[in-house]
Image: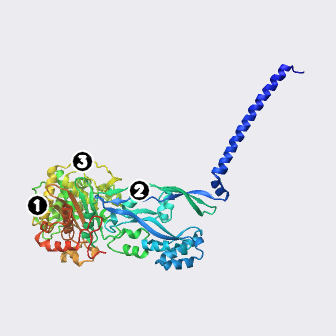
Amino acid sequence: MRKNPAESAETHARVSRRALLLGGTQLLFMGGLGMRMRHLQLNQADQFRLLAEENRINIRLIPPARGEIFDRRGVVLARNEPAYRVTLVPEDAGDVDAVIEKLASLIELDPAELDAAATEMRRSPPFLPVTVADRITWEELSRVAVNAPALPGITPEVGLSRFYPLRGDFAHVVGYVGPVSDYDLSKIENPDQLLRIPRFQIGKVGLEGKLEDSLRGKAGTKRVEVNAVGRVMRELDRREGQQGDAVQLTIDQRLQSYAQARLGEESATAIVMDCRSGDLLAVASAPTFDSNLFVQGISVADYRELTENDHRPLAAKSVQGTYPPGSTFKMITALAALEAGIARPDQTVWCPGHLEVSNRRFHCWKRAGHGHVNLAQALRESCDVYFYELALEVGIDNISAMAAKFGIGERFDLPLSGVARGLNPSRDWKRDARSADWVVGDTVNVSIGQGFVLTSPLQLAVMTARLATGLNVTPRLVKSVNGVDAPVAPASNIGIDEAYLNEVRRGMYAVSNHRRGTAYGSRIIEDKFRLAGKTGTSQVRNITAAERARGVTRNEDLPWNRRDHALFVNFAPYEAPEIAVAVVVEHGGGGSKAAAPIARDITLQALYGDAPPLDAYPAKDRQRIKKQQEEMRILEPGRSVTRRDRA
């Protein structure tokens, strides 16, 4: 059927509009496509040209600067310093041996490093750089840089490496870093990709290890062009990382260095603690070692020398070592008896030199005995029989509970490696650990710090600080992070009658200030700095009845490792305690002879903040102290106290 003219015109108009709309849309689409093609061809031509040549862009990590560590006064204990090295790209070098021969004419090359480099070249692609000289001097780096055109494939580089300016003085506290090992990676569930960077340094022990995550910092990134086989073509851009946290310790560098030097080559440890805040002012352990030995990987010879030393220089004895506390534990037994109402300060006990308990004879250190002694006299002269008698009445349950109040058997939360819990023995402990019942002889032994009880020097310092103040003081090592002070919770009252504490304190005062006190020879003359202390001697061997009958062998006549441990704890000043000190000398013999003089000297150094005046010492000691002060010179902050006989 034919359409009328009007319908035909309308249909024609509708078709024309649709054609126009469709054409416009097509034109707009083609225009947009053209603009996009122009953008790709002109603006991004370089990038696509690289892609066309089988190049790609990689994002690579930039190691951050490690956070520095400072003492309480701002002295640097661990810092980053430029580390100069020379790398070689075998592919660019051509004749590798000839290039290395030329390099050897400019700087001294370590044969061991060259062997390691040769091994790395054999197992790595030829375009990857290999280190052929590490930790070279600036002068050596300059010589290589000047002669670089004649050394194909050689590149002088500058990086950052850890350095410990005080070397051994903080080795057991700060610890050290070292190259990441497969063992390190195996201990981490999802290791940071930074740890896979060759020669990247990670904290191994001490503060460096415990605070690794915060000290490490955040990695930066850089975009580089690499071709299909992984060769870097050029760097496009970079974003620097974030440096690790700056950590400030509570330790005083001058006091720490003095304590370290005062311990000398003894196998010993000393801790100084602020009685009020719990701040650890010195945590020394001897003998020590140079932390810098481990930074690039310690040699077999150096490591063997450290591990074969019977004085165990690698051990942080201050927190890792546990020892029978000996007579330094007697204050705990005394307080347990006073609190239980069993002992009175004026009550006396007869000491004939021994006590028979369950058909076994427990001896006093003084063979002839002390006669009638009260609490103050028993502490002053360290009478064992007095505390045996108290223990028989008060029992292990009360003694163990009192020891717990003073931190014995407690593992303190410090960022140090291997902080020991020690052992505060009880009936339940023996049943679980030894499958045996507690017997009365066990209680007698524990009463004088022998038998099962074990304490760390850190715990002894905490015990002494709590005795001095009556407060539940806890140790603290980190003072601030990035300039923000770490919070310090006020110490609560320990919950012991002040009158009982005063009785024990008076006994400790007599130890150092009464002529019959076991540490009278190591007293402080200056009235305002008088100390209160307690000697301790802990046996490490059994003394047979036959040996007692013929006379106990003197420590000096025994092999070193069979001699008694020497201990001393003290607080000062007596009237207003500021610091608590604990010293342990392994196999040092008697506490009054080996440990007390060290503790007294360290106490005076802490109180004066510098070399004390000679008139603070007893007259008989002044010449010796004068000579000692000449041998030990306190250097400017940031440098170590030295001895003439120390490297």
User: Which label's residue is closer to the chain start, 2 or 3?
Assistant: 2
| Label 2 to label 3: alpha-carbon separation | 34 Å
Q: Which residue bears the numbered disc 1?
A: 527
Q: Residue at x 47, y 70 (%)?
A: 85
Please, which residue is most extreme toward the right here? 1
Q: Residues within 10 Å of mark 3 (few under 14, many from 20)?
A: few
Front residue of 7 and 537: 7
Using residue 202 as the reference point, say whether residue 69 is left or right of it: left
Residue type at numbered disc 3: Ser
Snapshot colouring: rainbow
Work out whether residue 600 can be spotted: yes
Instruction: Please provide percent x and percent y for residue 353.
Output: 14, 68
User: Which label's residue is closer to the chain start, 3 or 1?
Assistant: 3
| Label 3 to label 1: alpha-carbon separation | 30 Å
Q: Residue at x 43, y 58 (%)?
A: 216
Front residue of 140 and 277: 140
Residue type at numbered disc 2: Gly
Q: Quadrant of the N terminus?
A: top right
- Report helix, strand or loop for mark 2: loop
Q: Is residue 145 above or below residue 402?
A: below
Residue type at numbered disc 1: Asp
Q: Which residue bears the numbered disc 3?
A: 492
Which of the two marks, 3 or 1, is nearer to us in this view? Answer: 1
Q: Is residue 84 above or below residue 557?
A: above
Instruction: Please provide percent x and percent y for residue 78.
Output: 36, 63
| Label 1 to label 2: alpha-carbon separation | 47 Å
Question: Which label number is shown at residue 244?
Answer: 2
Using residue 441 as the reference point, say whether residue 5 is left or right of it: right
Q: Residue at x 67, y 44 (%)?
A: 35
Instruction: Please provide percent x and percent y for residue 560.
Output: 27, 75
